[in-house]
Amino acid sequence: MSGKYPWSERESKKAAEKKKFKPIPKVSDKRKKENAIYAGLRNEYLKANPNCKANLSGCQKTATDIHHTYFGKDRKANFLNVKTWLGVCRCCHSQIHNMPTIELLRLSLRNI
């Protein structure tokens, strides 16, 4: 026991443990690079495809979002694949994500 009181040693151990703690990054370095590429591709895509491709009820006509037709584990593999994207308005995009899969397939808003 190095200190006068037994709890003083415990406190110094706790302080040392806190210093060793390193938080996990919210986004990996690899994902940061992918997100930077995605942002550029997204802007180019929306400029080239300014109209909403879904045209569901309440459509706002101007594409503001990218809908990835592959999602789940396939989405990661196709994240930067522009051929799997659809430019949609926010209203339609919300509706798309609330639709059952069978309806998405019928409307060609999802790929298998």
Image (spheres, helix red, strand yellow):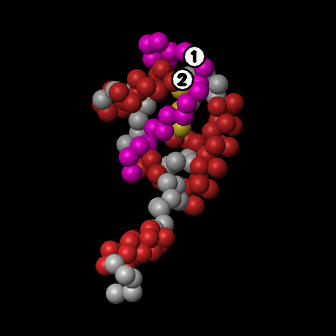
Q: Residue furthest top?
A: 58
Residue at 37% over, 81% down: 4
Identify the image quadrant of residue 39. top right
Dot 1 lies on which element? loop
Callouts 1 and 2 close, C-beta under 8 Å: yes
Instruction: Check disc 2 and give the amino acid type.
Output: Cys
Position of residue 104 relative to residue 1, above or below, is above
- Say which mark, if any, is on residue 89: 2
Split into 4 quadrants, where in the image is the C terminus?
A: top left
Identify the image quadrant of residue 17. bottom left
Residue at 45% over, 74% down: 16
Instruction: Tell me if mark 1 has few (under 14), some (14-19) or many (20+) residues whose alpha carbon lies within 10 angstroms of its own.
Output: some
The x, y position of residue 65, in whole percent, is 55, 30
Dot 2 lies on which element? loop
| 3 part of magenta stretch | no
In the shown orientation, is residue 57 left or right of residue 61? left
Q: CA distance from mark 1 to mark 2?
A: 6 Å
State the residue position of label 1: 61
- The residue nearer to you, when weighing 87 against 25, is 25
Is residue 53 visible to the viewer in this orientation of the structure? Answer: no
In the shown orientation, is residue 95 left or right of residue 100? right
- The residue nearer to you, when weighing 42 against 15, is 15
In the shown orientation, is residue 82 left or right of residue 103? right
Mark 2 or mark 1, which is nearer the start of the sequence? 1
Q: Which residues are magenta?
A: 55-73
Instruction: Check disc 1 and give the amino acid type.
Output: Lys
Position of residue 40 relative to residue 1, above or below, is above
| 70 part of magenta stretch | yes
The x, y position of residue 41, in whole percent, is 65, 43
Residue at 68% over, 31% down: 48
The x, y position of residue 72, in whole percent, is 38, 46
**Mostly what secondary structure, the magenta segment?**
loop
